[in-house]
Amino acid sequence: MSATVMDGTALAAKVKEQVRAQVETMERKPGLAVILVGDNPASRVYVNGKKRDCAQCGIYSEEYALPEETSQEQLLGLIDELNRREDIDGILCQLPLPKHLDEEAALLAIRPDKDVDCFHPYNVGRLMIGAPGFRPCTPAGVMRMLEEYHIDPAGKHCVIVGRSNIVGKPQAMLMLQKNATVTICHTKTKDLKAECLRSDILVAAAGRTGLITADMVPEGAVVIDVAMNRNAAGKLCGDVDFAPAAEKASFITPVPGGVGPMTRAMLMENTLLASRNHGKA
Ligand code: NAP
């Protein structure tokens, strides 16, 4: 079998166009504030991308680029100020923060109704019980891709490699809500290959280049590669050995051009949702 390559770039453009069309009709535009502390080059690239997405969607955005030596009080002070502003519907604090700052405290300080990343325990709890609200951007982007390609997780065995709070765990919840049977793997999993070979949908989110080789991919499986790693040559790549895996899979996401753009598109949807919840129309 030779897999259909799932085009995250094209789908993300479609989702952003849908957001733009809705924003265009709104009198009061959604607003997103992005906080970046320090000079992590990867974070800078992500923040620039988010600003571009906002501009494309007609969403007002503000960037706060704070120096590396910013104190916890200064960071919390800024979040407090943004929490109070009516024109700002979403607040995003780009991670990782410099080591001396308390990430958990910063994320907890963001008002849950402005938590467009869906990292606050209130929103994580709502996700867990299946209540409406924000969904974390990366796993939500994966679900949207499956929908676009008419892949229904119901009754399928979904194996997720990775159990982080931002990808693996929420991905498992979203798959469960769509009636998949879910297995979550991690570094203590005894036989990763055997688990992967039981999958109908395989989600790789370990952040380990080359971890998922073709012999771990069942014939006809749907393979979603969430990872964004750099290989020895410095090139962006995923966890999956793409070309040989694509020979066995039915569908597969590329890196780049798969889940990454979808994550950014889902942030735009969450910002729109936040603004609607704030009564903007
Ligand atoms: P993370 O917090 O480092 O979590 C990685 C998870 O993978 C952990 O649960 C870890 O297990 C597991 N793992 C690592 N090596 C493994 C192995 N050899 N066998 C089995 N499990 C293994 O990473 P993350 O933040 O979830 O991100 C994962 C990847 O997705 C990274 O490449 C990241 O860059 C990418 N990412 C992409 C997007 C996007 O927009 N496309 C968004 C977020 C993240 P333990 O828990 O046992 O340590």
Image (spheres, rainbow, N blue to C red):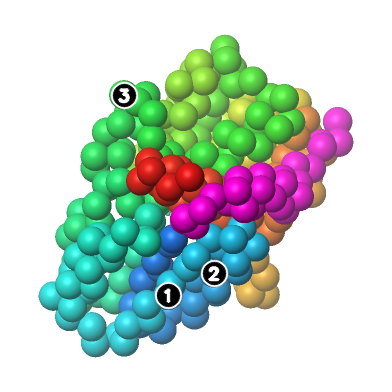
The reply, left or right, for residue 2 in relation to residue 191 is right
Quote the CA–CA distance across marks 3 and 2.
Answer: 32 Å
Question: Between tags 1 and 3, which lies in front?
Answer: 1
Residue 164 in sight from this viewpoint = no
205 vs 166, nearest the viewer: 166
Residue at horizontal 52 percent and vertical 20 percent from the top: 178
In the rendered image, the residue lying farthest to the top is 155
Instruction: Tell me, yes or no, whether the two marked residues, 2 and 1, touch with CB atoms within 8 Å.
Output: yes
Q: Residues within 10 Å of mark 1 (few under 14, many from 20)?
A: some
Q: Is residue 214 above or below residue 232?
A: above
Residue at horizontal 61 percent and vertical 36 percent from the top: 144
Kind of residue at disc 1:
Glu
Kind of residue at disc 3:
Ile
Q: Position of residue 59 (x, y in %)?
A: 53, 60
Residue at numbered disc 3 = 129
In the rendered image, the residue lying farthest to the right is 2
Task: Check residue 201 for magenta coloring.
Answer: no
Q: Which span of residues is magenta-colored?
A: 1-30
Q: Is residue 152 above or below residue 44?
A: above
Residue at numbered disc 2 = 51
Q: Kindly state the secondary structure of the residue where label 3 is placed.
A: helix
